[in-house]
Amino acid sequence: MSELDFRFDRGGLYFPGLRLWLDAHHSVGATDGVFVSHAHSDHTAAHAAVLFSPPTQKLMRARVRGVRQESVLEYGRPIRLGDVSPHPNECQAQLTILPAGHILGSGMAYIEADNSSLLYTGDFKLHQGLTAEPCEPRKADILVMETTFGRPEYVFPPSEAVWPGIIRFCAEALDNDETPVLLGYSLGKAQEILMGLMGSGLPVSLAPPMMSMTQVYKGFGIEFPAYQEWEGGAIPGRVLIAPPGMSTAKLRQQLGPSRLAILSGWALRSGATHQYRVDAAFPISDHADFPELVEFARRVSPRKVFTLHGYAADFADYLRELGFDAQPLSERDQLSLDLPTRLQVRVPSIHHRQDPAQTKVSAQCPTSHEILPGQFIAFASLCEELRSIADKSDKLARLTTFLTKSPSINRPILVSWFTGHWLPDDQRPLPRIGTAWFSRVLFAASGISAAQFAQVALLHGHLAEAVADLWSRHCLATTRPASDAIEPLMVAEIAELLRAWNANPLVGKDLATWTTIFNRASVIEIRWLARILIGDLRVGLPKALFEKAAEPSSGRIAVPSDGSLSFAEVGLSNPIPPIKSPQLSVMQSCLSLDLS
């Protein structure tokens, strides 16, 4: 029997000839040693004798109670297992720990015995993270690899293209007096998120479970942006990083107005926001995606491959098509999704993977040379301006000036858009307009495919931002008519289309009609048209404040001393409560205008 013969047992690997376990999921007594690849709870237990890296030692001490015999291994330095108890003294096999790139201290076990070699990956990723040592594959005769994302549909965009969307998600929430919450595991993902916010200027709080783990990271020289511990309750003006196991309902209850986002490779799944009960999902992962799994196997160039965890059978099947001798160890671990078991795909090289964010969002496609009141581009430009201004008094002053100059017939329409409704005389809930409808319109208007839409949408925490991004790429890639040849979109025209949709949805959402509208629109018009359609302008002012900037039927705004103003005064029906805010006196002076 070879010392490299092993069996797969309860999620871990056991080598009887070495008396060695790799990532045993159950507690192992003093008769055998256990290699712990990293300190996540699904790879650790209360073992009697362990081998691991220095960071994993510290992290495991913080997470797993008990006293154990510890053998600390330095990256790249082989040890003879016979020199380490409880392995047989006569054992000549060598074990080397190699960086896995998964989290801080994660390691792969490279075992040499009987003139052969075996590489066990544990969890790994090839793309460089922000807080983990870079992965170092090594050629081996036998490869045992994890395949969490072992299906072709799991292709992550570059992380550096995703972080701007995450930061924008947080900044927009803060601007709208909401607490942004980024959900990620306490060990590994939380520290990656914290590092990803470096340089953003966003004040950050950490949920208690993350504090001790972050301190261990700091002990190994990793410098994070400033943060403080969250002690529960509302934390206005701060970003909260919390574990996904926390109840989202309780989080919202404690924090008050808030926006939640999950950061996970599973963000690629359709319905991820519904599954996790969040507002956005971003594909930031500590695991290798499908192209990286293939690339890793090619770099190791083994005679035999064993796959485990995730889509082990599917990935082994794909490797056999590439000519590898591959076999799954954990078919019962297969995750169930209603997807075809065999997909014919071309796997992109990780070195030539297209960055969906390489094309900057252009501010404009052709528009009229002169912007006139009543044109939709004037409204869209105002929204762009309001979103870029931090001071709410300044926002309100500019909004009031804009409404002053707008045609009086448009003012109730504009107020209804700012308050999340389509029309001033129709307060029904908006139709649910999702990715599918926008994808069909974009395809009809520009040929942008559903696959392109899905890939770009991963970079944004808001559907409208993805639509605008894609339209910008279309504008830059095509020749548009001269600006004076495009009939400008009008506010009243958009309102009539929305009225028709409300009256008869089958007619109102007609692709031909909206394709024509899209082809007449600039990028910023597309962004704010999409936000109107889904009822979420989010320019950093509470909805009630917009009603205060609207013109009552008398032609003059009179703000009551308690700050209250009713929808009825601008053609809407729902009363609003009194507004108590530091900006009230500023608003009253701004609104003391004759708008006739």
Image (cartoon, rainbow, N blue to C red):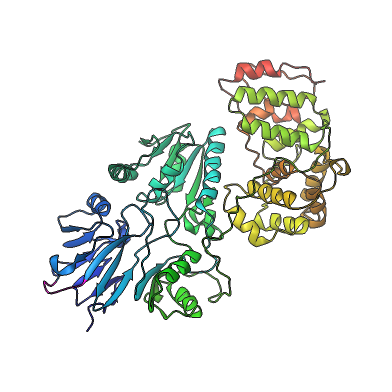
Indicate the position of residue 373 as horizontal and vertical percent values: 82, 30
Q: Which residues make up the magenta segment?
A: 88-93
- Left or right placement of residue 305 versus residue 8 in this view: right
Residue displayed at 38% across by 79% down: 303
The stretch drawn in magenta includes residue 396: no
Indicate the position of residue 317 as horizontal and vertical percent values: 48, 78
Q: Nearer the viewer, residue 299 or 587?
A: 299
Q: Is 307 located above or below residue 426 in the figure? A: below
Q: Residue furthest bottom?
A: 1
Indicate the position of residue 58 as horizontal and vertical percent values: 24, 50
Indicate the position of residue 48 as horizontal and vertical percent values: 16, 62
Figure quadrant of the N terminus: bottom left
Q: Nearer the viewer, residue 258 or 149?
A: 149
The stretch drawn in magenta includes residue 92: yes
Q: Is 137 located above or below residue 217 in the figure? A: below
Inspect this view and state whether residue 531 appears: yes
Dominant SS type (magenta): loop
Residue displayed at 20% across by 61% down: 50
Q: Is 529 located above or below residue 330 in the figure? A: above
**Quarter assignment of residue 544:** top right
Inspect this view and state whether residue 574 appears: no
- Left or right placement of residue 526 versus residue 21 in this view: right
**Quarter assignment of residue 347:** bottom right
Q: Residue furthest left?
A: 89
